[in-house]
């Protein structure tokens, strides 16, 4: 048996078989065969979720790495159909060649398109939703191996659920996206005091297409990033400066700082302040996907909660108080972003304008108390955890935070009554599927939040 591990090394699995279908017929046959044998099925993406949502456990794993690329594109309408296993960085390059782009992206482009939408991946922008809001239609293989196409007009209930479907309703085979003409983003980045940023954050979010900021939790400084559409020609950073700032400073040097902090925890707080003090202003413009995304080679563990935007200041002020008293200091910065409300059943931004707070810790450093305190603070304002990030909430707690939670469970039971697509994470966050046996455990697969 082949061991599976996610990127952050917080979740594992030992699938009984790994199949790499090259078309939907092969994938459907694999699903039917596994179901007949009483085994579970999970698609494998790039493993970039920090939770164990992607773990195949001891069941059958479907490797989608051969199922990539754009199937059909209509540059006039912006509709693009892409195979589910396509990594975002490949998709961005192919779209650029067609003169198209996704309207919004997160800052990591290693996920597959199906994994990104299924876990609720998002970027930032008060007028824009997560990646799943750019989906026009989905094609899925259901638990009996049959194919199902869904959109706002065809099987609309399935469409409302499956765009952020957690892999619980079926295996996505293709995604049809509503893309936009390729565009340039002008990036403006500058340091600013946290208190000042919190006071004017709502205005910043309203005034700019995309805004976010980073804050080292043992400092009082932030780095504010504002990205706006730009009609002029791109003026990217010089390649040497780009290499120095992103590859050397933000990855190699920061990685060395993290290792030093892990070895000597007493240095973390002063290192935090030094890192925050070295943030500098920069401005440039480039193709949108090159501005949205940033290479990340330093491994970490992450938790992220979506909260009502009006609660952001209070939550961050409480979080700053907690950071001061931590016995185990935090070497990684906190990231804050925003998104518009949407109508997707299990979207973290369902029916409310949302602020996202993501906290991190360097791999191998203690973070239990930091993450628990964060979850308590975010939970007090009705926070919803990112499905692909670590959290401790179960089905009973999540039901209180998602108005359509029981509708999703009902649809799941209808489409997959025997729990073919379940794993231990889904059993925990959704509850077991009616009539399905207990999901078999795999090493690490029973950890919803990953090791602390």
Image (tube, rainbow, N blue to C red):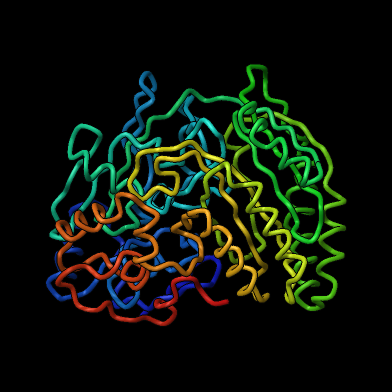
Q: Is residue 158 left or right of residue 305?
A: left
* Closer to us: 285 or 218: 218
- Residue at 84 percent across and 64 percent down: it is 271
- Residue at 14 percent across and 57 percent down: it is 414
Quadrant of the snapshot with the C terminus: bottom right
Image position of 294 with respect to 287: above or below: below
- Among the 4 quarters of the image, the one containing residue 317: bottom right
- Residue at 69 percent across and 44 percent down: it is 213
Image position of 135 with respect to 142: above or below: above
Quadrant of the snapshot with the N terminus: bottom left
* Closer to us: 450 or 349: 349
* Closer to us: 112 or 386: 386
- Among the 4 quarters of the image, the one containing residue 64: bottom left
All told, the count of numbered labels is: 0
Image position of 199 with respect to 365: above or below: above
Q: Is residue 302 left or right of residue 351?
A: right
Residue 281: percent from the left, percent from the top? 82, 38
- Among the 4 quarters of the image, the one containing residue 227: top right
Residue 279: percent from the left, percent from the top? 83, 47
Q: Is residue 331 left or right of residue 448?
A: right
- Residue at 31 percent across and 62 percent down: it is 20
Residue 185: percent from the left, percent from the top? 63, 28
């Amino acid at each position: 048996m082949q061991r599976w591990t996610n990127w952050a090394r917080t979740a594992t699995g030992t699938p009984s078989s790994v199949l790499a279908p090259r078309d939907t017929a092969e994938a459907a046959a694999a699903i039917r065969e596994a179901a007949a044998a009483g085994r579970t099925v999970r698609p494998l993406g790039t493993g970039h979720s920090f939770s164990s949502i992607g773990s195949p456990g001891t069941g059958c794993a479907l490797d989608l790495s051969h199922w990539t690329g754009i199937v059909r594109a209509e540059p006039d309408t912006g509709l693009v159909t892409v195979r589910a296993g396509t990594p975002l960085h490949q998709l961005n390059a192919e779209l650029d060649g067609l003169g198209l782009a996704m309207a919004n992206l997160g800052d990591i482009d290693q996920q597959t398109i199906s994994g990104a939408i299924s876990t609720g991946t998002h970027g930032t922008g008060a007028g824009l939703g997560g990646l799943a809001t750019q989906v026009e239609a989905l094609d899925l293989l259901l638990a009996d191996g049959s194919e199902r196409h869904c959109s706002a007009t065809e099987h609309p209930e399935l469409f409302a659920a499956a765009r952020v479907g957690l892999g619980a309703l079926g295996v996505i085979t293709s995604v049809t996206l509503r893309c936009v003409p390729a565009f340039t983003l002008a990036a403006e980045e500058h340091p600013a005091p946290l208190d000042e940023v919190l006071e004017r954050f709502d205005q910043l979010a309203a005034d700019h297409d995309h805004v976010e900021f980073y804050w080292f939790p043992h400092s009082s400084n932030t780095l504010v990033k504002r990205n706006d559409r730009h009609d002029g020609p791109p003026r990217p950073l010089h390649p040497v400066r780009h290499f120095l700032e992103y590859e050397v400073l933000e990855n190699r040097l920061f990685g060395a700082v993290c290792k030093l902090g892990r070895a000597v925890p007493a240095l973390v707080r002063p290192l935090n302040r030094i890192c925050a003090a070295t943030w500098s202003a920069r401005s440039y413009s480039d193709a949108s996907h090159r501005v949205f995304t940033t290479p990340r080679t330093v491994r970490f563990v992450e938790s992220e909660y979506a909260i009502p935007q009006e609660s952001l200041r209070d939550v961050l002020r409480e979080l700053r108080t907690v950071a001061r008293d931590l016995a185990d200091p935090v070497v990684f910065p906190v990231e804050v972003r925003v998104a518009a409300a949407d109508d997707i059943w299990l979207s973290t931004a369902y029916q409310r304008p949302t602020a996202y707070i993501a906290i991190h810790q360097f791999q191998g450093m203690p973070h239990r108390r930091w993450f628990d305190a964060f979850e308590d603070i975010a939970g007090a304002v009705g926070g919803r955890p990112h499905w692909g990030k670590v959290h401790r909430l179960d089905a009973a707690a999540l039901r209180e935070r998602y108005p359509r939670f029981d509708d999703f469970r009902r649809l799941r039971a209808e489409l997959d009554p025997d729990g073919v697509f379940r794993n231990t994470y889904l059993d925990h966050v959704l509850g077991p599927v009616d009539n399905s046996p207990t999901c078999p455990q795999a090493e690490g697969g029973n950890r919803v939040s990953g090791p602390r």
